[in-house]
Every structure is written in C-alpha cells, then in structure tokens.
Amino acid sequence: MKRNLPVTKNQKLTATIMDLTYQGMGVAKVDGYSLFCDDALPGEEVVLHVLKTGKNFGYAKVVERLTTSPERVTGKGKAYSQTGIAPLQHLAYPAQLKFKQKLVSDLLQKAHLDALDVAPTLGMQVPYAYRNKAQVPVREINGELKAGFFKRGSHNFLPLDDFLIQDKRIDEVIQAVLQILQKYHITAYDEATHSGTLRHIMVRRGHYSNEVMVVLVTRTKKLPHKDEIVAEIIAKCPDVVSLQQNINSKQTNVILGDETHVLAGKEYITDQLNGLKFEISAKSFYQVNPTQTEKLYQEAIKRAGLTGKETVIDAYCGIGTISLSMAKHAKKVYGVEIVEAAIADAKKNAALNNLDNLEFEVGNAEEWMATWQEQGIKPDVIMVDPPRKGLTQSLIESATKMQPTKIVYVSCNPATLVRDLQSFMDLGYKVTQPILPVDQFPQTAHVETVTVLERSEK
C-alpha cells in the first residue's frame, strides 16, 4: 500500500529544525516525516521549499529563516558549503565540538550501548587552514586555468582561490603554478571529451619543515614546455623541494595514476610528528591535520598506558606514524600493513629516527597476528586505526585471541566503531575509559575517536 506523504514536491511550509544529521544537515519533521536541508540549525524556525520526496524522507531548501539559532555564525562563503569543503561553517566552533560528541553518543544509544561515556571533543585553537595536503581539479573557465571543487553530487565546477581549510601557503603555491601553466598555454582536462593535459594539482606541505611538494597530474605523458615550466615553478616557489608529474590517462574519478616522474628535487618531503621525522612521498597516507594528529597520538599513547616494558602490535601501520610514536614508549612494536610501499617507507622512517625496536611486515593483519601468536609473541597492547569501513570480524577475532591487556581503537567513522565495539564486547573486552572524540576535520562533519578496550577478568 502506497503511503500518503504529508508533504509534496514544491510545497512551501513552515517548520522548526529539530536536529542535525551525521552530515550536518538540518532535520525538520512534518507529521513524523523527515525533511533534510542545508544551512539550518536546531531550534531555528524556517520556511522550507520541498525539493524532493522519497518514501521515508525528503529534501528541502530554506527560503526564509524566521528565527536564528544563537549558535549560528556568518559563514566564510557559500562555495564552501556547496562543495562540501566546510558544511558546518555556519555553526559556531564550540557547537561543532558538541555536535561531534553528540554524534558518537547518539550512535551508541541506537546500539543500546548508552552506558558508555563520551568525553568532550578535543578541538583546535584555530579551526581553519589546517590541511597539509591539497588535491584540486583544474578546469578552464573563460580561457583561464582555474583550480576549484565540484558542487556536491554534481559535475558543476566552482573555481576557488582560497580553500579555507588548507594551509594558506598551499593555496598560494596552487595559484603560482596555475599562472605559470597558463603562460605556457597548458590546457585543462575536459571530462566530457577526455581531452586536455592538466587534470589535478596536488600539493603537500610540511607543517614543521615548510617543505613543499607539487605533483602535476596530467592525462598525457607529454607536458609541453616542461623544462621552462619546471624552472619557473622552482624560481617562483623556492620552498618546492619536490616537483613531480603523475600520469593518469584513464577515464576515472581516481586522482592519481600509476606512473610518477620526479621533474625536480626529491621524491619526498620530510616533516615531523611529536618530534619524529617522516619522509612523505606523493602516494603516502599521512594524516592531513598535523596539529590534531599530534594530540590524537599523544592521547592514544596515554590511554594505552605505555611504560616502556610493553609489546605492541600496530595493525594498520601505514608509513609508521603511530608505530614510531609508540616505539618511543614501548619495549617492542610490530607493525603490519597491506601496502608494500608503505612498509618500505615505515622501515625508512624507523631508520631515520634511529629506532631499532620495531619490526614491519607486509600483508594481512589477521594472518600476521596468527603467525606472531605461533611464534609465541604476546602483545600487551594492540593498536588499530582502520579505514572508514572499520574492522573485519576475522581481525577482531584474531586480535582478541592474542589476549592483549588493552586494545586501542583509533576510528575515523563512529558508525563502524560502534558496530565493532559490540563485537569486541561479545568476545570478552569492555570499554574502560570515556571514548574521546578528536576534531581532525574542523568545519566538516567528520570526527575521529580514541577508544580503549580491556580484557574482562573472568
């Protein structure tokens, strides 16, 4: 039987915003039916124009705000909301931190884990210009090369000079590179015809070292006027210590192709985290908010309770950022990662910091845990920092089988964290400290968390 919806498309209605979704959209209820809308905050009374209706929920646009939330601030520009760069820019920063704490609490409540405490979110002093890495598409607008972003859910390109949440020097370097490429008539990629040369510009910058890497992502192997372009970029931006060309000739949304050539300087930039040096290459996974990453790792180490006597397993070690941080406070650290290049970097980074109490292996974490268990290795702490999809059930089982005293779970997705906590609890582990949200991505709805699980004494 078809449900009669209480609203129709193009209808105008007045409603009060009840809540925010996990993406930061306002939620209005009409006879129990949810309407989601951008740029609306809880408590605000608004006039809505219904854009789209589905069976269980719809989307609307705010056409007039009748009351204004005391937590509303003036955003820095419409484009940052439209592109999804800063969907929470209209919400005051202290309220953003509360929203992220509530996000975690609400998910726990839904899973009937509301007995677990969530600490206040650890925020930033200056919640802008924090990103140490940019990957921006380039298009031609009125004959000029422009960097920008696409509007959410579309292929409509919005040119931007200032990306708000990126390191300001990164924004400057992008503009300088564009001017040089424009001078030599380098064409921008055209998605519709799969033609043109330049697809993206990627820039990384060391927070402490100030070293800059520029990667020109091209559709073609040939970069016309290559030598002149390289010479001018290095002359205009002397802080660029690594200039590379990445070739991506496929019709794809994936940014980087398989082939990369160094045009000038080194293959990597160096930077520091909590006093440790790291070499970061074009494809390295490296946390994008260095200030908050230092805090995140310090909190993870503190909560792990390391005294210098422990054996630690880091199950998603990447280029060794957490492993090395823990190695300074533990007896021995074993790191495992599926990406071979990342393990090569991790070994290099351990040598760079004169740390010899680490062992890194390429492969599947579950399999290595089984091997280490056979070898009689007994970890005191297992550290997991998985991608957004969270942990597999087999990894959870392998980890608990090793019976570590503590499992420290760093998560970038509260939904999969809550699912995985339930599995750990079913296998005899319990959350012993308040879950700590850390704001790695101010102005967005993303939140990282640190959770400590301990073995229940039977």
Image (cartoon, helix red, strand yellow):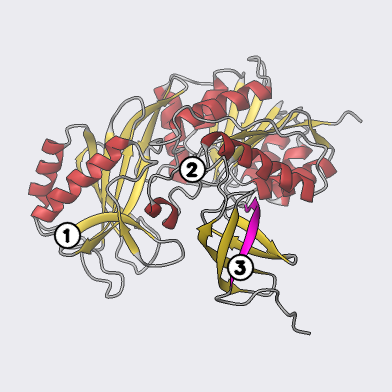
Pointer 3: what residue?
A: 13
Local secondary structure at mark 1:
strand
Q: Residues within 10 Å of mark 3 (few under 14, many from 20)?
A: some
Pointer 1: what residue?
A: 144
Instruction: Return the residue nearer the eye: 203 or 82.
Output: 82
Give the residue drawn at x 58%, y 67%.
Answer: 59
Label 2 amino acid? Gln
Q: Is residue 262 magenta?
A: no
Instruction: Return the residue nearer the eye: 11 or 149.
Output: 11
Instruction: Return the residue nearer the eye: 438 or 450.
Output: 438
Name the N-terminal-most of marks 2 and 1.
1
Label 3 amino acid? Leu
Frontmost of labels 2 and 1 is 2
Residue 390, x across and y down, in percent: 64, 48
Give the residue drawn at x 62%, y 69%.
Answer: 58
Q: Residues within 10 Å of mark 2 (few under 14, many from 20)?
A: many
Instruction: Return the residue nearer the eye: 360 or 232.
Output: 232
Give the residue drawn at x 55%, y 53%.
Answer: 40
Disc 2 to disc 1, how far (Cα)?
Answer: 30 Å
Residue 357, x across and y down, in percent: 55, 21
Horizontal side of 254 relative to 452 (left or right) equals left
Residue 443: mark in rendering: 2
Task: State which region is magenta.
Answer: 12-21
